[in-house]
Amino acid sequence: MTEKVKVVTLGCEKNLVDSEIMSGLVFGRGYELVSDKEDATVIIVNTCGFIDAAKEESVNTILDMADLKETGQLKALIVSGCLTQRYKQELMREMPEIDGIVGTGDFDKINDIIDDALAGKKPMLVGNPVFNYDKPLPRRVTTPRYTAYVKIAEGCDNACTFCSIPIMRGKFRSRSMESIVAEVEQLASQGVREISLIAQDSTNYGTDLYDGFMLPTLLNKITEVSGIEWVRLHYAYPGFFTDELIDTIASNPKVCKYIDMPLQHSEDSILKRMRRPGRQQDARALLEKIRTRIPNVSLRTSLIVGFPGETEQDFENLKQFIQDVQFDRLGVFAYSKELDTPAAKLPDQVPDKVKEYRANTLMEIQREISNLRNGNRIGHTVDVLIEKYDGRNDVYVGRSQYDAPEIDGEVFVTGSQLEIGKIAKVRITHSFEFDLSGEVVA
């Protein structure tokens, strides 16, 4: 009997890429990939272990899948990802429902793990978190056919005091430019038009391999690939955002005028405790430079509230900062006390209720800012990647270059018949808090 395998992905897009590689390996083995967990004889749960909420979701998902041993056809439950890299012994000891474990540096051995798990051996392969993404590996892309994520580096050297990523993913490692371009060419041959570049720290790309900041060169090489129309940049660390990178984004028509730059906070005292580079004046100067040199750029950031030692005045200053800067997109996270990180040992931990209140307050402020900035796009004509048709309302739904998949807004389009996965020119006629609507330009 051919095993039927379901891969469940939790956490970020970087985890999704790993799941797609495991799916490719499993499919290449001759196993059937299934979407319904009830049909699966083998389930792989690719976990996230970044913050408490993610760890809780991972554990609950594992337990939920384990129930299928009684109610479904499940024979083997495999757990992979960040949670296994960090808590392999605890998981295997405290969750007997798990039949096998594989870490972030060894998931290319997934077929061996499945074999051993089905044989009742309870395999646990968790070694060094370093994984070689340069070697050719099969990949079953699970995003819509026109868009895909490409991992350009793994790990991180920045040693932020709140972050456990170096524990789970290791030190920063760039992929070779040749391997990235080859992967993009393969994706383009399958019909992918939009590439989203991801890493823990994308702006640091190349410093370990080429002794320099090579992201601008990489962006230009990717946009030369036939069929690629949009290249989007995620997780741009502010400390390494060079003038050359700004010029490349501004001048290359295929690079989305969209920058995802996690700043984490505005206040110098908090940034110092976080061990983040630069200070508020540096961030303000960089953001002003970007907006001056890249007209109509869309800026996204993420912030952490409730970091140890964050006072009421710090929070008031943070509120003023986002009102001053007017980010187009904003994500807010309540600080999570992570084991084995320096911040977990800091005094003046902030109560959970205060953290939750501060997070909600910032999002309410951002709601108003987003509504205002979206209103400024009325009357403009923008390129929109069409993603689906809503028959009930007789509108197409897509995204502009200013909106990343899954996390940002949408554009509702009326007019002529459109093709899913193609880019249409749309004149914006209405704006909402996070979305836009418009008409196709003939």
Image (spheres, rainbow, N blue to C red):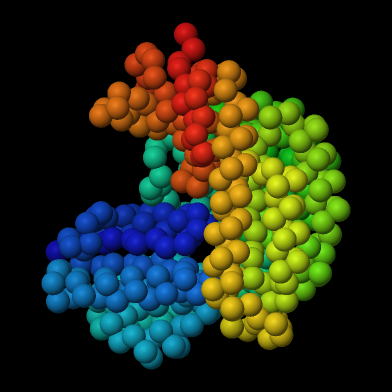
Is residue 361 visible to us here?
Answer: yes
Q: Residue furthest top?
A: 442
Residue at image point 78% right, 44% down:
287
Residue 403, image x, y percentages: 54, 38
Residue 312, image x, y percentages: 71, 69
| Nearest to the observer: residue 29 or residue 127 | 127
Q: Is residue 204 above or below residue 325?
A: below
Residue at image point 21% right, 75% down:
67
Q: Is residue 346 left or right of residue 154?
A: right
Residue at image point 42% right, 74% down:
56
| Nearest to the observer: residue 282 or residue 386 | 282
Q: Is residue 28 above or below residue 427?
A: below
Residue 277, image x, y percentages: 81, 62
Q: Is residue 371 left or right of residue 176?
A: left
Q: Is residue 42 above or below residue 373?
A: below
Is residue 202 visible to us here?
Answer: no
Image quadrant holding the N terminus, namely bottom left
Q: Is residue 371 left or right of residue 97?
A: right
Q: Residue furthest bottom?
A: 93
| Nearest to the observer: residue 62 or residue 328 | 328
| Nearest to the observer: residue 13 or residue 348 | 348
Residue at image point 45% right, 88% down:
89
Q: Is residue 435 above or below residue 120?
A: above
Residue 49, image x, y percentages: 50, 72
Number of numbered callouts drawn: 0
Q: Is residue 11 left or right of residue 241?
A: left
